Every structure is written in C-alpha cells, then in structure tokens.
Amino acid sequence: MSDDQKKSALADYLRRRQSSDDENPACPVWPDPDPEGRERRERRWSRRSKAARERRHLPDLAELILYMSFFGNDLAADVQTWAERVYPLIPEDDREDHTALRHHLTILTVSASLDDLRDTAEAFRRAGKLKRINKAVAALRLDYYSACLGDRHAPWRIAGEAISRAYDLQTPQDQALDYATAAVGWLIHAGRYEPLSADRLAGRRSRPRMDFRGDTSDFGLEVLARMLDERERRIYRRVETYFKTRTEPNRDGASPTGDAEEAGGEEPRPEDPGAVVFRSVGNVETSQRVAREFAELLNTRLRLAHKPDLAVLQKTLTDEFPQAAEIISAILSELVPLDIVRLRPILLVGEPGAGKTRFAERLCDTLALPHETYSCGGVSDAALGGTARRWMSAEPSLPVSLIRQFRHASPGIILDEIEKVGTSRHNGNPLDALLPMLEPLSATHWHDPYLQAHVDLSHVVWIATANELRSLPGPLRDRFRVFHFPEPGPEHLLPLAGRLMQDIVQERGLDPRWAIPLDGEELSALQAAWPGGSVRILRRLVERLLLARDRWKAEEEVQ
C-alpha cells in the first residue's frame, strides 16, 4: 500500500484546511444532527426579528440575549413597551412590594434611566411570589437593559444566564453556540472592558447606547473563532499522529500496534488465547473522535477466557441451583472439546422468580466472563445494535461497547426478559438488530454503524431469559439453544435457603460466618410456608426468618 493510500484521509483534511475559496468553502467535518430543526428555527428567527424592528413583536429575554433587535430597533421603546405590558400583571392590592413594583413600572413607561432600571430589578427580586409573571426572568430582563446602558455589574448576571442556557441539554446545538458567544462577550465586557462602561462612555459623544451589545457580540465571536481554530489544529495533529503511528514502523522495525499492546498492559501473552475484534475504523474523516476511542484496540489481540475445570464448575453451579442440574450438564458439555469459553446463544425459559437471571449471572462469573445484564422490558428501538455517528446521541452497539470497556473479546451479555421487548419498528426493532449478532457466520464480520466497519462478535456469549416463548419470533428462537428452567421444589429447600442466607448476610456487609445454618425448627417453618416455586418468595421468607432471629436474640440479651 502506498503512502498516499495510507494517508488519504489526512490529505483530504489538509486540502479542506488549506482551501481559501470563499465561494467553495470546505465541507463540515461533522454532519448537522438536526438540519430540519435548524432551518425551522432560522425561519422563525427571521420572522420575529423583522416583526420586532417593525414594532409588531416584543422580544423575550432569550431572544434579547441572542441579539434580536429591540422593539422598534430602539432600547427605550423596548423598555417602555415591556413595562406597559407587565404593569397590568402586578396585583392591585395594598402590599408594600406590589405598590413599589407598580410605582417603578410607571416610571419605566415614561422614561427609563440606569438607576430606574436597577431599582425596578431589585424591586422584582424583593417581591413575593407573582402568579402572572416570573419575577426572576423580569429582573434579568431589566439587568439586560442595564448592561446595554453601561452598568458595571449587570453583565455578570447576563453572562451567567447565557452560560446556563448554553449548558442546558434541551437547548439545540445552534442556539447553544449563540448562547456561548453571548456569554463570552458579556464576560469580556464585564471584566477587561469594564472601565469603558461608565467613566469613559460620557466622553464618547458619537457612541450609540446600543454599542455595548454590539461589542459583546463581536468579542464573543472573535474569542470563539480563535478557540475553534485552535481546536481544529489540535484535531489535525491528533489525526496526523494517528495515521503516523498506524502506518510507520518504529525504530526497531516493529509494527506500531505492538507498542499499543504493550502500553495497554491488558492484552494476552503470546501463549494465552486471544482474538482480534477491531481491524479498522471506517470513514475516519467524519469523526476523529471515533478513531481516537478505538485506536489502541485496532489490530490488537484481546483476551479470551480459558476453559475452567468443568468438574469443579459443575459442582459449584449444581450446589447453588440443584433444580437445574441437567441444564448445567448440557451447557458445560459444549466446552469439553474446547480450550476457550465459547458457547452458542442460550435461552432460559421459566416461570417468574425461578432464578433464571441469577443463574445466567453466576454462569458468567464461574466462567470468568465479564458481563452485563441488559433489561429488555420496554426497549422499543434498535439502540442495542448501535447508533450511526451522524446523530448527536451516537454510540456503538452493546457488544462493541462491552468489548471496549472490558478489553475482552468474549464478554457475556444477559438479555433479561427478552419477550417483553417492544415490537414497534418506528425507530428500529432490537430483535431485528440482534439476529445477525447471533448467527455465527454473520457475527464474524458484523457491521457496527458507529465504527462504520466490520467487527468480530463471534466470541460474545449471549444468554437470554424469558417467561414464555409465544411472543418471540421464530427466526430468533431458532438461533438459541432453548432450555426450560425448572422451578425449585421443596426437596431443594435446604441448599437454596443456605445460599440465600449467605447472600443476604453479605449484602448487609456482615462476615459470611454470621450465616449460622438453619436449625430444625426454622427449616420446619420454611417448609410449611414455601411448598416450592419462586425463589423470590423464598428469599423474602428467609429475610423474615433472619429478622425474627435478630429480634429473639435482642430480647434474650435484654432479659
């Protein structure tokens, strides 16, 4: 492969950065996450801004912070019109704070000085709760007027409000950038340019009263432009370093991926089992962030779990789940001819409370598999299969996320209550996304939409639980080994109660040695109350028994 081919993405990036043709600007690196919403907001802004200049619309506080024109393009007219509209909203009673508000608003409807605006803002802050107007927003609007007239303290409040709105996750990205611009501009004005706001303003006859607002917009845009330029330069350097480390040999002539493996410290030794899951990241140009996230994992052998001692494992699981002895033998028999842990997808079907999820988690624990339980109840989209990077909420598929998190090629994924998954296909269906991951052939080169490249998911261990099979589609059932997980019977009471008691004691933070075995009277009480069935019910009974034991011990100590 030639150097030009190896660094094609970097070359394209350089061409975009070096292009200076204003008529043919470089394409954006990141696609717009909400183009329709952006266009809708721009049209609405254009209409309302024109109406504000023509005295048909009084801008609200958010629009003023984003530099919409004042009412009639005149600050004084904006103040007077706003005061006239707010005055009827103040209750006409004899309360002192309401009387003060009406008095200050009356002054603003005639002529507003800087002192009048400050006094009215303080009157709103001191007033009690007003049902028809938000007093905090009203006080901030008056602070905004004061900042535009050269007040020395109001810009700090406006900057804080703009920062809060920019940080709000409900704010669209385009508006968040405008709020950040306003915040930076007002902060600069309040700090470095504060002496201009009062003393030197009087000596500038030609300076219009609205220049403070215009200055803050220029300040914010200038600073953010410098910051974004520096950010692009850093991204360029990281992309350059990435391609350099992936394509150029080191001084010893070894591949750079070998250095990454040594730096990680978690890759398997040459004699240990391992597998390469990630071999490339597609379309690096659209997101250098994705390339950075997976740079250390590309062409790197990730660990696989050794096959444990099956006899010891079978005894451990059978002691904990005596009712599932046949299922345990059937699952572990698949590992006999292998050196690593590799299981076909498993589906455990049984009554609620039979212990299916607990068994799946313990199976992964004893096999030394890092795992995660994914509750399928109420899930109605294909997020399990990942989200394309063009969306703001983009993320890799669930197995890719776990492989990256654990740096392990065969994590366990427990799909709890898979029959309760949503059936709508409006945003994709999780079961449809799951099908190719369960098929051995397609799993070896499954395409992740976030990476935009093929990954090897053939070593992932899938375990699903369900209360019934009727709602599951046939193609999905065919990909699982279905085991009907039995409920425990009264003959299993002794081992189950002992294990539950140990779990409860450990959850309380006590030494496991405090789990004193049940005596004959306690066992008789449990047998009378639990004829078999749900392990959840048995757990509650054991908890009550331990509570009664603690009370009896406390009463004995008192006597």
Image (cartoon, rainbow, N blue to C red):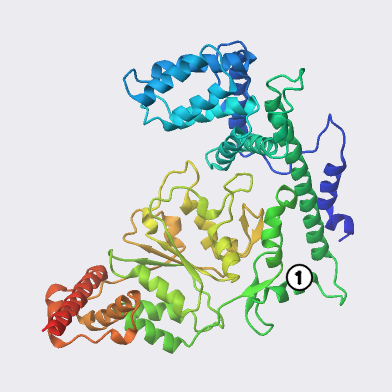
Residue 19, given in percent of the width and then of the height, sits at: 87, 39
Relative horizontal placement of residue 219, taking residue 88 as reference (left or right): right
User: On screen, 90 above or below 491?
Assistant: above
For residue 458, say whether it is visible.
Answer: no
User: Residue 198's image quarter?
Assistant: top right
Closer to us: 249 or 68: 68
Is 37 placed above or below 69 here?
below
Task: Give the image location of residue 214, x and y in percent.
Answer: 71, 26
Can residue 163 be spotted in the picture? yes
Query: Regarding mark 1 in the picture, which secondary structure is present there?
Result: helix
Task: Establish if 514 lies above or below 528.
Answer: below
Kind of residue at disc 1: Thr
Looking at the image, which is closer to me, 277 or 407? 407
- Reply above or below: 411 against 519: above
Label 1 Cα crowd, 10 Å radius (few <14 / some 14-19 / many 20+): many
Residue 257, position as x, y percentages in the image: 76, 70
Find residue 374 and report its horizontal and vertical position in percent: 44, 60
User: Is 119 placed left or right of 215 in the picture?
Assistant: left
Quadrant holding the N terminus: bottom right
Q: Which residue is at 37% across, 73% downward?
A: 359
Q: Quadrant of the C terminus?
A: bottom left
Instruction: Identify the image quadrant of residue 510.
Output: bottom left
Identify which residue, 153 or 405, lies in the foreground.
Answer: 153
| Residue placed most toward the observer, 312 or 184 | 184
Pointer 1 residue: 257
Relative to 255, 555 lies left or right = left
Label tally: 1
